[in-house]
Amino acid sequence: MSDDIIAEIRRDYIYNLAKKGERVDGRAFDEYRQIEVETRLIDRAEGSAKVKIGNTQVLVGIKIQPGEPFPDTPDQGAIITNVELAPLASPSFEPGPPDESATELARVVDRGVRESGAIDLAKLCIEKGENIWMVFIDVYVLDHDGNLMDASALGAIAALLNAELPNERYELGKDAPLPIDDLPVAVTAAEINGEIMLDPSLDEELIASTQLTVITSKDGSLAGMQKSGVGMLTFDQIHHIIDIASKKAKEIREKYLETS
Amino acid sequence: MSDKPKKLIEKGKRLDGRKVDELRPIKMEAGVLKRADGSCYMELGGNKVIAAVYGPRAVHPRHLQEATQVIIRYRYDMASFSVEDRKRPGPDRRSVEISKVSREAIEPSIIKEYFPRSTIDIFVEILQADAGTRTVGINAASVALADAGIPMRGLVSSCAVGKVDGQIVLDLTGEEDNYGEADMPIAMTQDGKITLLQMDGHLTKEEFALAIELAKQGCKAIYEVQRNALVAKYKGGSYV
């Protein structure tokens, strides 16, 4: 994902642990790190959430503004997703426009929200062909310790869940909650030396041959997937990842999204 | 923003209830990020700012390196959702200028000769803006530098002073900045030397002298908070 480097000796260490069925931080292969979700911390934003997965931290803010619809969808709102790999978050992030990893991240988060139908875009039309709501999902990565994909996706849906349409500001009536129909959750696993590890930490990401992110909807169906990294996966491995990812996604959804 | 209120100061009290020489509530915590070498989170009123320091580390591109001392780079950036109307991510003319003067405010406190051919990178992210963001950024950056173990001559503290309804006030709100007569962000070292001075508006020389005195008081109060945040980190505490 980034051009961080990892010492050969650490790589060997992680490989050897994997052979014994262990991970550096003592987790089981299908065990996630601790998750923390905090919402409504940016008053200027229409919705916001900070997600921590282990030491990884992302802050997501939602801005909602009126704008012109796209010509092919004159009666639908628009979603614009952007990820900033802020240079605060890692020694390998540099200031500048989003690079390919940031763009990939943003597009996967966007696809999860879009394809699951999380936002009812038809309800975001103010005047057909003229005026619609544009929902900006801006993800700021603050501390990068692996699995930005899941953190960003969880932050996005958690922030959307507490977002309000700022009707009053534009003299369109009373503020109303953003209509949310689904709760997509992304869960990522990495392939390391033939083993599949859920929620890879940064060290694990650096030595993983590849990763697979699986996004599931509320009904358990798949809403998006992304293989990221140069390695290969067998069909069996993919089925296994989908299995553990959708189980984990259900837990995360129940614990962090359906309570609020 | 709404129309100008009739009075910004009534019976010695400002619209948010503060006295003219009072700072907004402050929160500060050092060491909030794991990957960064040093970091600090600060709130001042509605401002929410995070600062991270990386370095001393190798300079890229290499032609920027200096043979006798470390170079300091400072990036002030506003999150797109930190303001009322979404801001396009990335630098603009305002943030480029603020980055420059903030760097110059911080730089004199760093003992640069210790790390020739290296860089210290300071990143300041404004998560929520509520007037005075550059001063909050400088305060947080100074603590983040100390948290990173960078050799320094002392901390730099910063606050804004200005003139509102004919009176000199400390730590302006957005409303006071918009409708007031002058705004002056200042930073100083802990022994009272000015490292940042900007002003716009109108002040007489007497008012300026008064404003500087008030800024000294403000910076002194902020210095205490900075110091406590650093002490708290090593005592295992958090917010001050």
Image (cartoon, coloured by chain):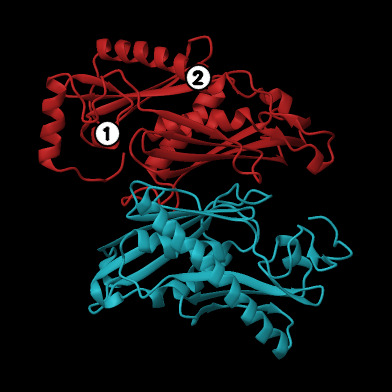
Q: Position of residue A66 (x, y in %)?
A: 73, 40
What's the residue at 40%, 12% (across, down)? Answer: A247
Which quarter of the rendering shows the C terminus of chain A?
top right
Mark 2 lies on residue: A255
Mark 1 lies on residue: A205
Chain drawn red, letter?
Answer: A
Q: Is disc 2 placed on a helix, strand or loop?
A: helix
Which label lies toward us, 2 or 1? 2
A63 with respect to B227 (left or right): right
Q: Position of residue B121 (x, y in %)?
A: 36, 62
What's the residue at 23%, 27% (across, down)? Answer: A231
Chain under label 1? A
Q: Amino acid at mark 1?
A: Glu
What's the residue at 76%, 33% (across, down)? Answer: A129
Q: Position of residue A201 (x, y in %)?
A: 29, 33
Q: Amino acid at mark 2?
A: Lys
Palette colour of chain B: cyan
Q: In the picture shown, does residue A206 fall above or below B153?
A: above
Q: Decide which of B143, B227 is in the foreground and name it.
A: B227
Q: In the picture shown, does residue B108 fall above or below A14?
A: below
Q: Is disc 1 placed on a helix, strand or loop?
A: helix
Marks 2 and 1, how far apart in space?
26 Å
Q: In the picture shown, does residue B227 fall above or below B209?
A: above
